Image (cartoon, rainbow, N blue to C red):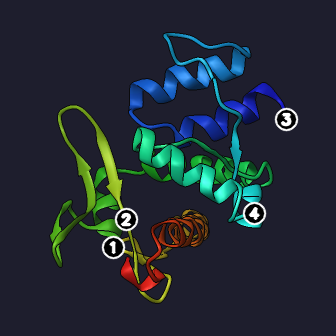
Amino acid sequence: MSARDNLFATYRLGSSPQEKVVTARARANGQGQGGLEATEPDLYLEALLADPGGQGREFCRRLRDSSFTTVVLPLACSELFAQLECAASAWFALSKDTKISQAGSYGPVSGTLSGYSDSKYREQLELRQTATGGLYPLQSRRGNGTFCQLAKSVMRQLDEWARALLRLVAHDLGVPFSFF
């Protein structure tokens, strides 16, 4: 695994934004920075899911001790994330009117916020996965089909992994998965 790949996976799964960047730099350099030196071995998602009794217990212990843990994603998914970033950049390069027509204005919908916003400090798009695996509010239209397909794929994959990790937590707590 190259330093960039390790940086990529770590950056996306740290805790706070500041720690994400510091941890990513530390991992890329192979050394700790700012007191975030790695004292415990990395937890790899594939190993966690393959060994719920051993690695899964360690995952849950770290959650109890620190309220978060870093999980290294499979290297194969980095290409999908890179493609999504590229497609998202192209979408954000569209005109403001086009983005609003495709994603709607940012605001409350069914108890949650979603849509496109261009505020004083940042431009953002908040999407939700629907029960059928679609995206809300962004719909596939001319000029954003690739972005929509990639976003759906990434959201489905992240949802699948999150549910698998919640199963580990449920097992550790001794409750059924339906508890969540």
Residue holding disc 4: 51
Q: Mark 3: which secondary structure?
A: loop
Q: Earlier in the sequence, mark 2 or mark 4?
A: 4
Q: Residue furthest front?
A: 174
Nearer to the camera, 92 or 142: 92
Name the residue at 20% across, 60% down.
106
Sequence-earlier tag: 1 or 3: 3
Kind of residue indicated by mark 2 = Leu
Question: What residue did someone put label 3 on?
Answer: 1
Question: What numbered label is drawn on residue 137?
Answer: 1
Give the foreground label among 1 and 2.
2
Residue 94 position (above or below residue 33)? below
* Circles 3 and 4 in contact, beta carbons < 8 Å: no
Q: Which residue is mark 2?
A: 127
Q: Secondary structure at mark 4?
A: loop
As drawn, the label of residue 26 is none
Mark closer to the chain start, 1 or 2: 2
| 36 versus 131 height, above or below | above
Between the C-alphas of marks 2 and 4, the distance is 32 Å
Asked if disc 1 and disc 3 are in contact, CB closer than 8 Å, the reply is: no
Sequence-first tag of 3 and 2? 3
Q: In the rendered image, which quarter contains the C terminus?
A: bottom left
Q: Mark 3 belongs to which amino acid?
A: Met
Q: State the separation of the CA atoms marked 4 and 1.
A: 37 Å
Between 63 and 70, the residue placed more toward the observer is 63
